[in-house]
Image (cartoon, rainbow, N blue to C red):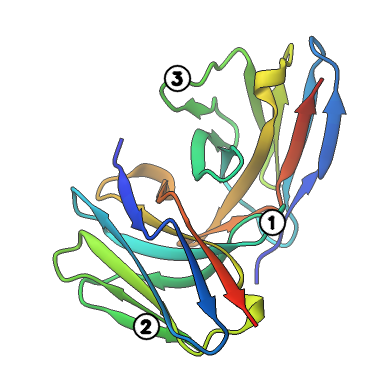
Amino acid sequence: GQQLNQSPQSMFIQEGEDVSMNCTSSSIFNTWLWYKQDPGEGPVLLIALYKAGELTSNGRLTAQFGITRKDSFLNISASIPSDVGIYFCAGQEPGAGSYQLTFGKGTKLSVIP
Amino acid sequence: GAVVSQHPSRVICKSGTSVKIECRSLDFQATTMFWYRQFPKKSLMLMATSNEGSKATYEQGVEKDKFLINHASLTLSTLTVTSAHPEDSSFYICSATREDEQYFGPGTRLTVT
């Protein structure tokens, strides 16, 4: 199946700093999604992107659907301690049945107070 | 937002026994549910697509006779790990589709001793 390359794998940042992470694929996606997962919990949707070039914000989070449809980034501004967690990108391929998603390997974010 | 629950949240079983994990959509009906497996510090790997009233669709490399999926109603899918072995120890997460979005359950931590 499709592979997603997500980077960086992990980040250590100071509270208040901005964060950026991205995902790339070798093929196009129709939908890009960004999730956050806390330890021992299921992923929670942060932002969904449905059109190439789309830029969407959710509070301090901003994500963009790359115009080539092969990449997406997530920015977090002014990070706070509760931003700690693992962030996953996920994509839905054209023609994928039943909304099947492919996940990136995750970016583990640590925020130093 | 939509709520998906899983039961149990944690289970420890002996090698050779079978374990059933339930996934419920609490406030909506889901014709399609997904089962994922997640190893520590790894991404979510789709195991199978569970369709209400029909057989599940398994991803390549997932043994359908070992991981039995039953989607008996529009709000319940079950995953049974048969003859469990220590290598089946993992975090199992389900999701349910509502309109265009997947909503994830909180996960079930399975430990096989």
Q: Residue A77, relative to residue A38: is it above or below? A: below
In the rendered view, does A23 fall on the left or right side of B27? left
Quarter holding the N terminus of chain B? bottom right
In the rendered view, does B50 fall on the left or right side of B109? left
Q: Mark 1 points at which residue?
A: A39
Query: What is the C-alpha distance between the residues marked 1 and 3?
Result: 27 Å
Marks 2 and 3: in contact by CB < 8 Å? no
Q: In terms of sequence position, does the residue under pointer 2 or pointer 1 come before the other?
A: 1
User: Hey, what amino acid is under mark 2?
Assistant: Thr
In the rendered view, does A3 fall on the left or right side of B105? left
**What residue appears at the point 65 percent right and 20 percent down from the top-left corner?**
B87
Q: Mark 3 points at which residue?
A: B61
SS state under label 3:
loop
Q: In which quarter of the image is residue B20?
A: top right
User: Hey, what amino acid is under mark 3?
Assistant: Gly
**What residue appears at the point 32 percent right and 49 percent down from the top-left corner?**
A4
- Name the chain under label 3: B
- Within 10 Å of disc 1 (Cα), the crowding (few <14, some 14-19, many 20+) is few
Q: Where is residue B60 in the image (x, y as percent from the top left)?
A: 41, 23
Instruction: Tell if the residue under mark 2 belongs to the same chain as the one under mark 1.
Output: yes
Q: Name the residue under label 2.
A: A56
Q: Which of marks 1 and 3 is in front?
A: 1
Does residue B93 appear anywhere in the picture? yes
Q: Where is residue B58 in the image (x, y as percent from the top left)?
A: 48, 26
- Counting the numbered discs, the total is 3
User: Hey, what amino acid is under mark 1?
Assistant: Pro
Instruction: Tell if the residue under mark 1 belongs to the same chain as the one under mark 3.
Output: no
Q: Which of marks 2 and 1 is in front?
A: 1
- Within 10 Å of disc 2 (Cα), the crowding (few <14, some 14-19, many 20+) is some
**What residue appears at the point 83 percent right and 40 percent down from the top-left corner?**
B10
Q: In which quarter of the image is residue A62?
A: bottom left
